[in-house]
Image (cartoon, grey):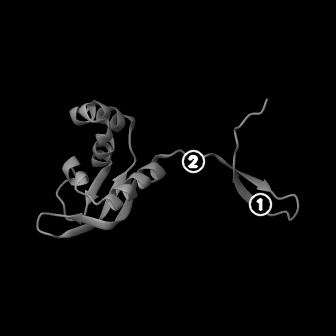
Amino acid sequence: METVYEFTLPRGYVDSDGVVHRRGKMRLATAGDEISATRDPRVLSNPSYLTIVILAKVITEIEGLPTVVPNVVEHLFTADLAFLQDMYQRINDVEPPMMKVVCPHCGEVIETPVNFTMEG
């Protein structure tokens, strides 16, 4: 199972020397990441800060930076923040189970998501 994913930011983080950093890595989130983020004093005083704290926990690397802390995430361009939020959602969402089925018309074997919706 893959737990760390590489990314390239659309714009890039610009450090205090004007150097642009675009490549990085994000790991899967744990329940502990999300729980500890909700207890962060900055989140308690401003709930919209939750995204910043969680991303700072799961971004394991931005090339050329010693660490990724909330202050780094705060200074990303909005396009980069949106990109990372989308990536976080995609890698942490549970994919529906798949099953192989045979097309009754052509006989081709295909994979399709299992639909758990119940009608009653």
Q: Which residue is labeled 1 in the image? A: 109
Left or right of residue 51, residue 87 in this image: right
Say above or below: 25 vs 38: below
Q: Secondary structure at mark 1?
A: strand
Q: Amino acid at mark 2?
A: Glu
Say above or below: 30 vs 8: above
Other residues around mark 1 within 10 Å, as few (<14) / some (14–19) / many (≥20)? few
Say above or below: 19 vs 73: below
Instruction: Indicate the quadrant where residue 53 lies.
Output: top left
Q: Position of residue 59 (x, y in %)?
A: 30, 52
**Residue depicted at 39% across the width and 59% down the height:** 83
Q: Position of residue 4 (x, y in %)?
A: 38, 54
Other residues around mark 2 within 10 Å, as few (<14) / some (14–19) / many (≥20)? few
Q: Amino acid at mark 1?
A: Val
In this rendered view, identify the residue nearer to me: 51 or 22: 51
The reply to whether residue 2 is in sight is: yes
Left or right of residue 95, residue 20 in this image: left
Mark pair 1, 2: CA separation: 20 Å
The reply to whether residue 1 is in sight is: no
Of the 4 image quadrants, the one containing the C terminus is top right
Q: Are marks 1 and 2 in contact (CB under 8 Å)?
A: no
| Foreground tag (1 vs 2) | 2
**Residue depicted at 31% across the width and 32% down the height:** 38
Residue 44, labelled with which disc?
none
Instruction: Indicate the quadrant where residue 48 lies.
Output: top left
- Disc 1 or 2, which lies upstream in sequence? 2
Left or right of residue 69, residue 92 in this image: right
Q: Which residue is labeled 2 in the image? A: 95
Say above or below: 68 vs 115: below
Residue extending farthest to the right is 105
In this rendered view, identify the residue nearer to me: 76 or 96: 76
Q: Secondary structure at mark 2?
A: loop
